Amino acid sequence: MKRYKATVNAAGMWVETILYAQNPAQAYKLFQAIFGAKNVPHQPLQIGQL
């Protein structure tokens, strides 16, 4: 698993958050599922591995 960071809009505030996923596409889909597609404006950035 790899660690990904994204800046997302959560309740009207822009915050950086991290999640674990297998690849960048899966991380992007997970961020969109959690925060909504409009609230994830950019692809997540890989920041490490587990």
Image (cartoon, helix red, strand yellow):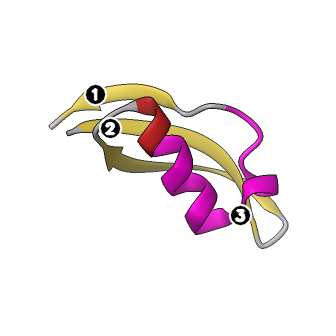
Residue 29: percent from left, percent from top: 54, 50
Residue at numbered disc 3: 36
- For residue 7: magenta? no
Which of the two labelled residues, at mark 3 and mark 2, occupies the earlier sequence position?
Answer: 2
Q: Tell me the number on the disc at residue 3.
A: 2
Earlier along the polypeptide chain: callout 1 or callout 3? Answer: 3
| 9 sits to left or right of 5 | right
Instruction: Note whether 38 is above or below 2 in the view shown.
Output: below
- Range covered by the magenta-colored residues: 27-42
Q: Quadrant of the N terminus?
A: top left
Contact check, label 2 and label 1, Cβ < 8 Å: yes
Q: Nearer the viewer, residue 4 or 33?
A: 33
What amino acid is at disc 3? Gly
Near mark 3 (Cα within 10 A), the count class, few <14, some 14-19 or many ≥20, is: some
Nearer the observer: mark 3 or 2; the answer is: 3
Question: Which numbered dot is residue 48?
Answer: 1
Kind of element beneath mark 3: loop
| Residue at (67% x, 52% y) in the render | 15
Secondary element at image label 1: strand
The CA distance from mark 3 to mark 2 is 20 Å
What whole-number distance in Å separates the C-alpha atoms at marks 1 and 3? 24 Å
Q: What residue do we see at 28% from left, 28% from top?
A: 48
Q: Is residue 20 left or right of residue 31?
A: left
Instruction: Give above or below for 33 relative to 30.
Output: below
Q: Is residue 36 magenta?
A: yes
